[in-house]
Amino acid sequence: MATMVERTGIPMPRPGRFAAMVVVATPALREAVGHTLRALGARQVLMISSVSEARARAAAGIADLCIAEAGLPDGSGISLIRELHAAGWVRGMVLNTTDDPYSVRAALAAGVRSYLVSATASLPRPAGDRSDGVDNLSAREIQVLQLVADGKSNKDIGESLGLSALTVKSHLARIARKLGTGDRAEMVATALRSGAIQ
């Protein structure tokens, strides 16, 4: 199931006459979004996996559309869209796996054209030697756990991922249920042993 919030009043580019930048960390999702844009007739699609690379490529020229994952390994896709909007980019879209109202509000305030929430944004990871609990973690939950392992507070994690501290707390509660422990150190240790985080 997918949910979409859209702002009106911003003209969309004509089919076949737009360039896009896709900033998504997950390779399979990035390729799927790029494939869809090409099928819609995009003349050029830049495929990028990080905020830093997106900033460098954006400085080289303005594309018509930026589609960014809300939580990227090196920062927030919402913050990236805000920066691009200030630099003259008109259209921005955020992909996320949560419909947290604070994230949606922040995205729309940043000039985001659309905010897409979909379970497909959390693609399955290859099966390995992970425990069942770790295998059930979403991409967002793994991002949260990685930041916990880096010693970040809920507030810091929220700022890094463009989420409220309350949403981070909700993610941690779901992680605790899946891993069978509410102890942050034990959650991190379990994820480290399984290779889910580094």
Image (cartoon, grey):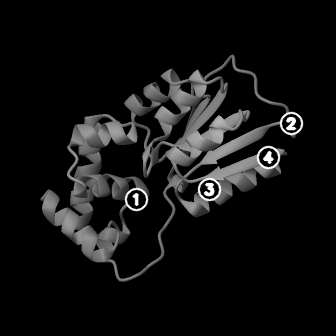
Task: Say which label, 4 or 1, has the lower sequence index.
Answer: 4
Task: Say which label, 4 or 3, has the lower sequence index.
Answer: 3
Residue 57 on image: x %, y % = 64, 43
Say which residue label 3 marks: 30
Disc 4 secondary structure class:
strand
The C terminus lies in quadrant: bottom left
Q: Is residue 119 left or right of residue 186?
A: right
The residue positioned farthest toward the right in the image shown: 16
Q: Local crowd at mark 4 within 10 Å, few (<14), some, or many (≥20)?
A: some
Residue 81 placement: quadrant: top right
Select label 2 or label 4 by which is in front: 4
Q: Residue at x 29, y 52 (%)?
A: 147
Q: Amino acid at mark 1?
A: Ser
Q: Which mark is residue 138?
A: 1
Label 2 vs label 3: CA separation?
21 Å
Disc 2 secondary structure class:
loop
Task: Say which label, 1 or 2, has the lower sequence index.
Answer: 2
Say which residue label 4 marks: 44
Q: Residue at x 19, y 69 (%)?
A: 189
Marks 4/1 in contact by CB < 8 Å: the verdict is: no
Q: Amino acid at mark 3?
A: Arg
Q: Amino acid at mark 4?
A: Gln
Residue 15 on image: x %, y % = 85, 37
Q: Residue at x 40, y 59 (%)?
A: 138
Say which residue label 2 marks: 17
